[in-house]
Image (tube, grey):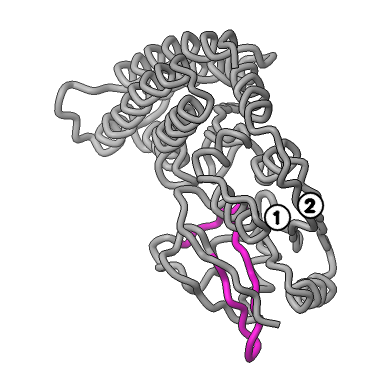
Amino acid sequence: MNIDFEHRMSAHCENGVTSNLLRFNGVDLSEPMIFGLGSGLAFVHVPFMKFNGAPITSFRPLPGSIFNKVNKALGTKIIRKSFPNNPQKAMLELDKTIERGIPVGLLVGVYNLSYFPSAMRFHFNAHNIVVFKKENHKYLVSDPVMEQLEWLSEEDMVKVRYAKGTYKPKGRMYYIENVNTDYNLQKAIKKSIRFTSMMMIKAPGPIIGVSAIKLLSRNIKKWGEKYDSRKASRYLGSVIRMQEEIGTGGAGFRFLYAAFLQEAGRTLKNDNLLIASEKMTVIGDLWRTFAIDSGRVCKLRSRDNQTYDTVADQLLVIAKLEKELFTDLSKIKI
């Protein structure tokens, strides 16, 4: 069966897959609105856990969280399946679902996506794509980070669905069974903003939200003091990579959330949300400056005497502004 599926690029794969699947089912929401309703903005720093040899720093919630939250807010019925130890069954289920005329979202590893440029392939197992056609043992893929549709062989599809390493995909697949077009957008916006604000300023423990930004600041200073330049730069470089290369991260997510607040403000005619959007854009600029300066520190190319201490201090400024912003957002009447 031929499925008339519209492919659109996005800044972030899960936003794009969610938006494209919803549009196919008759609900057309922008990527910023999807990101906001899915509470996609987050910050986590876990120094006692390692990813690729460096402490974990993440600017996103767990994979699948955005898709789940958006569809829950809209009252959409979704189907999720996984096949931890049965690739044959996983592929058969994918084929059967496509034959029913249903585009399928997949969680995959990036490394064996043959249509990716070699420089972009790395061991990251939280990428989202949509598959909606099979022909001559190849699958037609809508990957939101690519400009056009791509083909992936059946052999490579098995590899990406069963990638090894951290957070194994285990054949996960998901799709929309039916949608509710009579959803309350104002209620969904309000609930999502409250949740995001709570996670950023009131989450328990020091590893989530604004508290985690402060913790990262303290740790960056320790890295510069205690470790040799190679280890310190690897740790700081990992933060930059998670921020700027894996899922757009810090600055990109702040700009996306600013766009959400702007769209929400215009839709609901709420000037306070428009003001918050402008403040979030400023914060995004500061995150981008932090990444640039940190990159120079890692490569020993400092132009304005940037050090581990100075970039750590930049994070304290960001933490202060984000706490103020999300405190204000938690109090806005929507």
Three-letter amino acid code of the residue under disc 1:
Lys
Q: Disc 1 vs disc 2: Cβ atoms closer than 8 Å?
A: no
Give the x, y percent position of residue 136. Answer: 63, 91
Three-letter amino acid code of the residue under disc 2:
Ile
For the record, the magenta segment spans 121-142
Residue 82 painted magenta: no
Task: Identify the mark at residue 262; answer none if there is no mark.
Answer: none
Q: Main secondary structure of the magenta part?
A: strand
SS for tag 1?
loop
Query: Which residue is at 59% across, 11% downward?
Result: 333
User: Quarter of the image containing the N terminus?
Assistant: bottom right
SS for tag 2?
strand
Task: Identify the mark at residue 78; answer none if there is no mark.
Answer: 2
Q: What is the quadrant of residue 178 in the picture?
A: bottom right
Q: Which residue does the numbered mark 1 point to in the structure image?
A: 168
Q: 183 or 275, which lies in front?
A: 183
Q: What is the quadrant of residue 241 in the picture?
A: top left
